[in-house]
Amino acid sequence: MRFFLKTTLFLGEGSLKNVEKIVNENERVLVFSSRSMDRLGFLGEVTKYLEEAGAVYETIIGVPAEPTLEAVEEILPKVKEFEPEMFIAIGGGSVIDVAKAVKVFYDVPDLNFDDVAIFSRFQKVNPIPKLKTKLIAIPSTSGAGSEVSAASVIKKGDTKYTLVSPELCPDYAILDPRLPEKMPKEVARNSGLDVLVHAIEAYVSKAATPFSDAYAIKAAKTVFEYLEKSVSGDREAREKIHYAATMAGIAFLNGRLGLVHAMSHKAAWIGPHGLVNAILLPYVMEYNIKRAPGRYDSLAKELGFKDVEELYFKVIELNEKLGVPKLSEIVDEKEFMEKLDEMAKKAYEDPLVNFNPVEPTVDEIKEIYMKAFRGE
């Protein structure tokens, strides 16, 4: 067993100021920012600290909500022209994932995406070589865990591919609770439910350790206790969920994920990642619990629930309270049925299936998709 964390964390209100301490005088810094972070003045705050540190900087504002290979390829020429020594990514998980992917292909220009991007557990990929450009991740949403994770999820066509290497872990993460305060209600809900999926999947994973368990338990407890208040805009709850997202990120960095993520990655075309995860979670839990209830039962007791059944119904109840729709309410039936076979086959091939407590068949995955679609 092994437990790993490369990222130094700064947290608390006003912790954004640590940018000034981290960056050196005359260091060339490229800042990736979401439009919302620019609009709300947080990008301006970061650049003020860069100026105070005497750094040379440029900014790239706006990346797609779901990071794409096209976006990475479009950004690369500007990056190469500027020649940064450090990246800062301020925004949601998408912004951080794009910065990580750009870092890979900036530091190793001859690398081919298809040679290193993981799509199937039956496919051999080359390891990502050592990377030199430092990265500060400053998440504005509370869900992805990308600020500590070793992965960057990038969409090519309709499918999500994963770049995975400890080299992708940010060097620093700044968790300033002022940033997620302005999250729209729906984003707070979807990203917060993603935290719960990360925590549960990391805990029941075949790769879980006592150390990853500790982070997973704390993250899951926090979601059950604070997510509803966070979605309503409660300031303290937003802060708690913001930290829980990073805790769950540390949990899955080490314990990995499972079938929920394998299936949602292949259904990326349907809707926001966190929402699709939340919809699929009860159906995957039901499937896994019937065949391997042990770890779910252990988690239920750690969370203060009577048994695995109570945990299962608490997940369903939280989804209902937060207005999570059925799959059939957000996707066209004809299109869903046309893509079902391909989604099930690709989900079966996803590397994360290796860590699921149960090895599913393609037909079983298809049935889970169908149950989620029908809302059974």
Image (tube, rainbow, N blue to C red):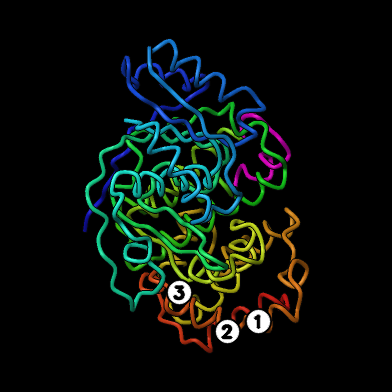
Vertical position of residue 176 compared to residue 276: above or below? above
Q: Name the residue under label 2.
A: 366
Q: Nearer the viewer, residue 141 or 312?
A: 141
Local crowd at mark 1 within 10 Å, few (<14), some, or many (≥20)?
Answer: some
- Residue type pointed to by label 2: Lys
- Residue type pointed to by label 3: Pro
Q: Left or right? Give the position of 222 relative to 314.
A: left
Q: Left or right? Give the position of 246 relative to 268.
A: left
- Work out which quarter of the rendered image holds the C terminus and state it: bottom right
Tell me the mark number nearer the camera, choosing from 3 and 1: 1
Q: Mark 1 points at which residue?
A: 370
Mark 3 and mark 1: span between their CA atoms? 22 Å
Q: Name the residue under label 3.
A: 293
Look at the numbered discs 2 and 3 and tell me whether their residues touch, using CB distance below 8 Å. no
Per the image, label 2 sits on a secondary structure element best described as: helix
Look at the numbered discs 2 and 1 and tell me whether their residues touch, using CB distance below 8 Å. yes
Q: Nearer the viewer, residue 154 or 358?
A: 154
* Horizontal and vertical percent position of residue 49: 46, 15
**Does the magenta-highlighted stretch encompass residue 144?**
no
